[in-house]
Image (spheres, helix red, strand yellow):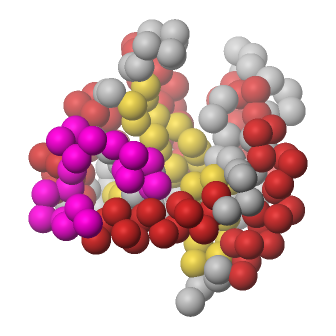
Amino acid sequence: MRLFDAHCHLQDPRITHCLEDTLNATEVQGVQQFACNGTSEDDWPQGRSDKWLDNLRKQLEEVPQAGLGECGLDTSKKVQTPIHEQEEVFKAQLELGKELQRPISVHCVSAFGKLHDMVQHHGPFPQGLILHSWIGPAEMVDALAKIKGVYFSLSGHLTRMSKKKYLWRGCCWRQMHQMVGHAWETHTRNGC
């Protein structure tokens, strides 16, 4: 089976010690390609500046096979950027991704209504937009899935969440747990 890891952070210093082993293990499991996501401008060589959008455009143009992401909205307590600023940046990222015809990787924490409204307003997404590690309300899945080009991914994080918090209705929890849990266990065997 040929697999594609839709979201990882290979640049994360927490896995530097086992990166080679992890890549070898994933290859044995059939993973042929990765989407390596940046989470902040600190992941970029030049860092944050007033020209962040121009810098992002330049990097995307230099690597034609690159997608855009990770981007999105996060209103959790650990994020200090005001939501209106996040919305401005996310809007610019969605527009840039569409303009350059790139797939977009989106993450959302505690801002699902705002995310829904922005994705609905800026859709469709012909190159694809993946809402990775989706833990949003089940009621939003149908509405978001109707937007052309919107896809969802699930992660091992779901296996550690309360069943009562976020569930995909119509999806058997045990089957999801077994499927996602097996993939997560395979990834974590080397202590990563």
Q: Vertical placement of 25 versus 82: above or below?
A: below
Q: Is residue 160 magenta?
A: yes
Q: Position of residue 149 (x, y in %)?
A: 36, 62
Q: Vertical placement of 45 versus 148: above or below?
A: above
| Residue beneath the point at 77% across and 46% down | 15
Q: Position of residue 146 (x, y in %)?
A: 20, 59
Position of residue 80 in the picture relative to residue 56 (left or right): left
Position of residue 87 in the picture relative to residue 41 (left or right): left
Give the extent of the magenta segment: 155-174
Q: Position of residue 185 (x, y in %)?
A: 56, 63
- The answer to whether residue 85 is seen in the rendering is no
Assign the magenta stretch its main secondary structure: loop
**Residue nearest the observer in this picture, 57 or 47:** 47
| Residue sitting farthest toward the bottom | 1
| Residue beneath the point at 37% across and 69% down | 178
For the image, the number of numbered tags is 0
